[in-house]
Image: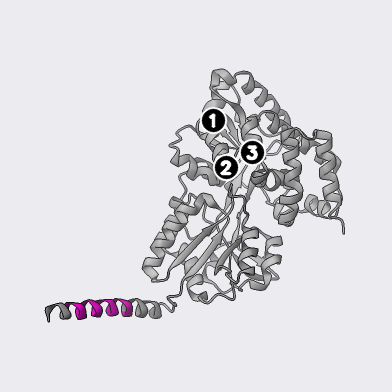
């Protein structure tokens, strides 16, 4: 009898617990059905999964995080196409910009009436409606180890044009052994790291030195019109970076090896953005660092590239839209969400109500440039993912491995842009 009673009590406890979860979900207006978020920033995977677990516990809604990209060999766009074909599209998924939005517009939920819209100036909009939640604000220039530059006698203030970088690279390279360096710059151009060159470095050609939002060069290239002087100066910059990079990291290295060389003090410069702050913190890096502008022009430029890196869209066919909306809103309006963005993921929030400040030195450098108005646009996402990854990335890779020279690099890029002419 006692055994049967204990069974009854145990069953009652389970039923009561289930009922409490169900009531809690109903009170919040949420279904207990799971939601899935797919995103393309593997460097924030651990932090995002930790936050999702906390949010799931608080809201009684299971959340699955799928992180795609980096050195995985599969980009998010390709994965999403596979998910769509399999009838398994996520409830929330990330896009990079306009071209990505056009591809997924039929699935994008109108988010114009969401509460967070009023607290950001960089939401993704199309035809006057808000569709994209800005994941963060990010930026990049050339990250530098200030301690190494000081030992080498290089003033970061001179790193504002091609001549300044050329002189600095030559000076540091001559002292490489004494400084304990394997290379002057840590740069990656392997095909599976094509985003470093064909997304981020490519943007130097598109927007360096131009007023924020200026699409003149971008629109010309999209129309097949190439400014050969600007392209020639840009090619000089790419050649300089490749020349002073560790050849193994440049041609076969992955994200970890590229960032790791800088973290270990084996490279004076790193061609990445403030998203590496988390990696550098994990590596217990203590040296001083900041960003300098890209030296892709003969003329002086004094800004870095700053923008939201991606945007979360909600799948309008999701079976749990309410939970998906709440997941995003809670990032902005809960302490746990704010701490995840700033402390967990090391990101710069895109929302004015968030008062936490990032501790990472590179994120602080981005904020300083932004506060001074010394910023240039991200225009690379006006070009399709296929153009960047399948057309441009192999050209950069061929140049990096020595299969083509600088003149051929210029010629290949010119033909690629001319091929966009409609």
Q: Which residue is mark 3?
A: 188
Q: Looking at the image, which residue is at 82% across and 39% down?
A: 410
| Closer to us: 73 or 37 | 73
Q: Which residue is mark 1?
A: 146
Rendering quarter of residue 413:
top right
Q: CA distance from mark 3 to mark 1?
A: 21 Å
Q: Looking at the image, which residue is at 82% across and 51% down?
A: 221
Q: Are marks 2 and 3 in contact (CB under 8 Å)?
A: yes
- Crowd class of label 3 (few under 14; some 14 to 19; many from 20; radius 10 Å): many
Rendering quarter of residue 68:
bottom right
Earlier in the chain: of badge 3 and badge 1, it is 1
- Whether residue 14 is in magenta: the answer is yes
The spot of residue 346 in percent (x, y) is 48, 49
Q: Looking at the image, which residue is at 63% across and 71% down?
A: 108
Q: Is 180 situated above or below 9?
A: above
Q: Which residues are magenta?
A: 6-19
Q: Which residue is mark 2?
A: 255
Question: In the image, 373: left or right of 407?
Answer: left
Question: In the image, 312: left or right of 170?
Answer: left
- Per the picture, the main secondary structure of the magenta-coloured stretch is helix
Earlier in the chain: of badge 2 and badge 3, it is 3
- Whether residue 357 is in magenta: the answer is no
Q: Disc 2 on helix, strand or loop?
A: helix
Say if residue 148 shows up in the picture. yes
Q: Is 78 situated above or below 127?
A: above
Count of residue discs? 3
Q: Disc 3 on helix, strand or loop?
A: loop
Rendering quarter of residue 193:
top right
- Crowd class of label 2 (few under 14; some 14 to 19; many from 20; radius 10 Å): some
Q: Is 331 situated above or below 31?
A: above
């Amino acid at each position: 009898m006692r055994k049967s009673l204990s069974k009854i009590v145990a069953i009652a406890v389970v039923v009561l617990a289930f009922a409490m979860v169900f009531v809690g979900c109903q009170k919040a207006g949420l279904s207990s059905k799971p939601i899935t978020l797919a995103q393309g920033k593997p460097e924030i995977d651990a932090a995002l999964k930790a936050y999702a677990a906390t949010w799931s516990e608080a809201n009684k809604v299971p959340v699955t995080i799928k992180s795609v990209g980096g050195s995985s060999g599969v980009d998010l766009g390709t994965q999403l196409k596979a998910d769509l074909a399999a009838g398994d599209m996520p409830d929330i998924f990330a896009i990079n910009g306009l071209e990505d939005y056009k591809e997924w517009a039929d699935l994008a939920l109108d988010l114009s009436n969401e509460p967070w819209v009023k607290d950001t100036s960089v939401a993704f909009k199309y035809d006057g409606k808000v569709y994209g939640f800005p994941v963060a604000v990010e930026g990049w220039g050339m990250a530098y180890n200030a301690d190494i530059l000081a030992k080498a006698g290089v003033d970061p203030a001179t790193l504002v044009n091609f001549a300044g970088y050329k002189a600095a690279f030559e000076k540091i390279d001559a002292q490489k052994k004494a400084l304990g360096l394997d290379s002057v710059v840590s740069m990656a151009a392997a095909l599976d790291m094509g985003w470093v060159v064909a997304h981020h470095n490519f943007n130097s050609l598109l927007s360096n030195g131009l007023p924020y939002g200026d699409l003149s060069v971008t629109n010309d290239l999209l129309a097949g019109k190439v400014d050969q002087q600007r392209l020639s100066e840009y090619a000089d910059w790419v050649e300089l970076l490749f020349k002073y990079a560790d050849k193994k990291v440049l041609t076969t290295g992955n994200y970890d090896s590229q960032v790791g060389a800088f973290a270990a003090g084996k490279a004076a410069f790193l061609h990445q953005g403030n998203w590496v702050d988390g990696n550098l913190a994990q590596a217990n890096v203590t040296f001083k660092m900041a960003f300098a502008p890209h030296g892709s022009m003969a003329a002086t430029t004094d800004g870095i590239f700053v923008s939201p890196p991606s945007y979360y869209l909600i799948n309008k066919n999701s079976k749990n839209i309410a939970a998906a909306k709440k997941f995003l809103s809670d990032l902005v309006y809960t302490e746990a969400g704010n701490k995840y963005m700033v402390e967990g993921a090391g990101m710069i929030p895109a929302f004015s109500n968030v008062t936490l400040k990032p501790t990472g030195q590179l994120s602080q450098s981005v904020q300083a440039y932004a506060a001074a108005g010394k910023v240039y646009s991200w225009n690379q996402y006006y070009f399709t993912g296929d153009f960047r990854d399948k057309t441009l990335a192999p050209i950069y890779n061929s140049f990096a491995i020595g299969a083509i020279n600088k003149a051929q690099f210029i010629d290949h890029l010119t033909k690629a842009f001319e091929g966009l002419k409609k």
